[in-house]
Image (cartoon, rainbow, N blue to C red):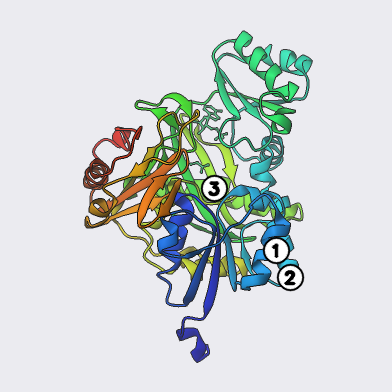
Amino acid sequence: MTLTLFFPTMKVLVLGSGGREHALVWKLRQSPRVSKIYCAPGNGGIAAEAECLPADLKSIESLVHLAKRIEPDLTVVGPELPLTLGLVEHFAGHGWKTFGPTAAAAQLESSKSFAKLFMQRHHIPSAHYAICKSREEVRDALARFHMPIVLKADGLAAGKGVVICKTKDEATTIASEMLSGKMLGEAGLCVVIEEYLQGDELSFLVLSDGNRVAPLVAAQDHKRIGDGDTGPNTGGMGAYSCQALLDEQMQNWILQHIARPVVQGMRAEGVEYKGILYCGLMLTARGPMVLEFNCRFGDPEAQAILMRLESDLLEALEAAIEGRVSEGDFRWSADATACVVMASGGYPGTFEAGKKISGLEEAEHMKDVKVFHAGTSARDHTYFTAGGRVLGITARAPELKTAVARAYEAVSKISFEGAHYRKDIAAKAGKR
Ligand code: AMP
Ligand code: GLY
């Protein structure tokens, strides 16, 4: 080890603009080796902790241009889009160290049919399914499924591509709309019909170096807009993480039967999966089953998870890139965390932006509370709403119920016109 390692020398670029990216910036800044953090494009709150730069995450060319200008020592990719467009391999071509899977590896998220066929080849537990590219195939598949079923657009659809259908008529109508391209464009030209699974959902993330994995603490998301899991799906309205969410035996089972077989299966097929592998699981009576994979940290799970991380995130991400992940790469707090998302009026439908946010300072002054910004902009030290999910108010405490109460107390101090949030984050966790 050389002496230079003890000086902050690294320039880090975080790509993205949500609460997850704010949490990544916040945690990476705590690394003694980081000298400078950029975030592109970032948001109002991130701008207080990193230098934000304009960026178009849909254009690899513009991101290459940006990186040429700032020459990052490490780039950390928050959302899936740049990964599925091949950012990692493009940046590698320029010699820039980048955290995240290649486009080939990210197919586990970008194509539901790829993920289902892959899981079948590698005996990874998940729901029964059919892949359909025409209305006739949908009709034939529906003949053998018991209702309800879950209909999924094959491609990326920003949380709008999954519909639970109670009747065959409903499934036929929605599948037709997806297949016509009218509903979701290209993402819906192929659909997956899945058996409806019942149980508790769990977000289980591992860090992978393409060969070995290190588990992160588990979290639970709240995908529906309304209390009691009602209304349409969203990007995620809140999350919590605590030790009681996943016991050691179950974690070992998931590692042995799901996370490691995925990474080894990809490897056997000639694709190194490096980065975060997010396993969206349903804990069913038949055991844990995979609902989906994501090739990145979850949002808002990252906020709840990273607030429990005590070791250096930068070191862990580098270990993955350099192929030296070990199970002990993370050190976690025994504390529980809860994140409550405050959203704009109308979200997940249409909403107005530009509403003034008040009470942020008061909330931020609370002990063990961090307000992660998502859709916000800043002007003259004042913050305004600028997206659907606006803030992720996150708190930690030795007990989950205290963390939840603390998060809601902070939420009560913040207001903006039309603000709404779920009142039941972690309510299902009972007395954990
Ligand atoms: P996905 O994007 O595939 O995770 O789906 C979004 C949400 O739809 C999940 O978080 C679940 O709440 C629900 N879901 C997806 N697949 C199923 C399934 N097979 N059975 C029941 N619910 C599901
Ligand atoms: N919260 C779910 C996701 O990030 O996909």
Q: Tell which of 254 and 71 is nearer to you.
A: 71
Which mark's residue is nearer the viewer, 2 or 1? 1
Vertical arrangement, residue 60 with respect to residue 294, above or below: below
Distance (Cα) linking label 1 and label 3: 26 Å
Q: Earlier in the sequence, mark 2 or mark 1?
A: 1
Regarding mark 2 in the picture, which secondary structure is present there? loop
Residue 340 visible in the snapshot: no
Residue 422 relative to residue 223: left or right: left
Quarter holding residue 236: top left
Regarding mark 1 in the picture, which secondary structure is present there? helix
Quarter holding residue 332: bottom left
Label ID, residue 64: 1
Is disc 1 surrounded by few (<14), some (14 to 19) or many (20+) residues within 10 Å? some
Label ID, residue 23: none
Regarding mark 3 in the picture, which secondary structure is present there? strand
Q: Tell which of 52 and 75 is nearer to you.
A: 52
Q: Is mark 2 within 8 Å of ligand 2?
A: no
Residue that mark 3 sits on: 278
Q: Amino acid at mark 2?
A: His
Q: Horizontal and vertical percent for residue 5?
A: 50, 84
Q: Residue at x 70, y 28 (%)?
A: 188
Vertical arrangement, residue 351 with respect to residue 124, above or below: above
Is disc 2 surrounded by few (<14), some (14 to 19) or many (20+) residues within 10 Å? few
Residue that mark 2 sits on: 94
Q: Earlier in the sequence, mark 3 or mark 2?
A: 2
